[in-house]
Amino acid sequence: MEIYLVRHTETICEKGICYGQSDVDIAVPFDEIFGRIISELPSEAIIFSSPLKRCVILAKHIQENIKAISYQEDERLKEMNFGDWELKSWNEIPSEELNPWMEDFVNIKVSNGESFVELHERVGQFLSEAISTTNQPIIIVAHAGIIRSILCHQSSLPLRDAFNNKVDFGQVIKIDF
């Protein structure tokens, strides 16, 4: 099955801000980038999107420009929940909190947030359901963390190595699952 993983375009957040599940907007202009993304997608597909606006804006644009068999927003496609770190500069997160997480982001939960393994579990549940319901191409509009998790599911890459998968803003990654 063909799956197209699409990362949202750049946000309005300054570089160095931890924005995880915060519902931040995308930077403008984005028309040219959206056009390039559409050109890399199939002409007909099922579309799934994170419900965060930085993904929904792009997903709705895709829906309007291809033959969307169906469109669904799914909470499990939200970026990692960074809890108390949301909308803080990475530099202002106390080192006694940040350093242990940086050493084991897979298992250590952010205060009032989640760990990468928890994100990976919800993504796995989503994938199992999405794949079992169709043989049509699927487009998933989501975040870098979600896309890295899907790539780990697909390739059996250990979660600690998830960041080996580079995922740029507006990037389309086609995989067979």
Image (tube, rainbow, N blue to C red):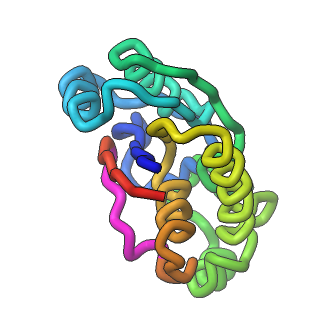
Where does the image place residue 7, in percent across and percent down from the top left? Answer: 40, 45
Where does the image place residue 42, in percent across and percent down from the top left? Answer: 32, 32
Residue 114 image-quadrant placement:
bottom right
| Residue in the image at 65% along x and 84% along y | 100
| Residue in the image at 53% along x and 58% along y | 145
| Residue in the image at 49% along x and 33% along y | 55
Left or right: residue 13 versus residue 129 is left
**Measured along the vertical axis of the image, is residue 154 above or below residue 86?**
below
Direction top: furthest residue: 64
Q: Is residue 84 visible?
A: no
Region rendered in magenta:
162-169
Left or right: residue 66 versus residue 60 is left
Reply yes or no: does residue 168 show up in magenta: yes
| Residue in the image at 53% along x and 77% along y | 156
99, 163: nearer the viewer: 163
Where does the image place residue 138, in percent across and percent down from the top left? Answer: 48, 39
17, 66: nearer the viewer: 66
Reply yes or no: does residue 17 show up in magenta: no
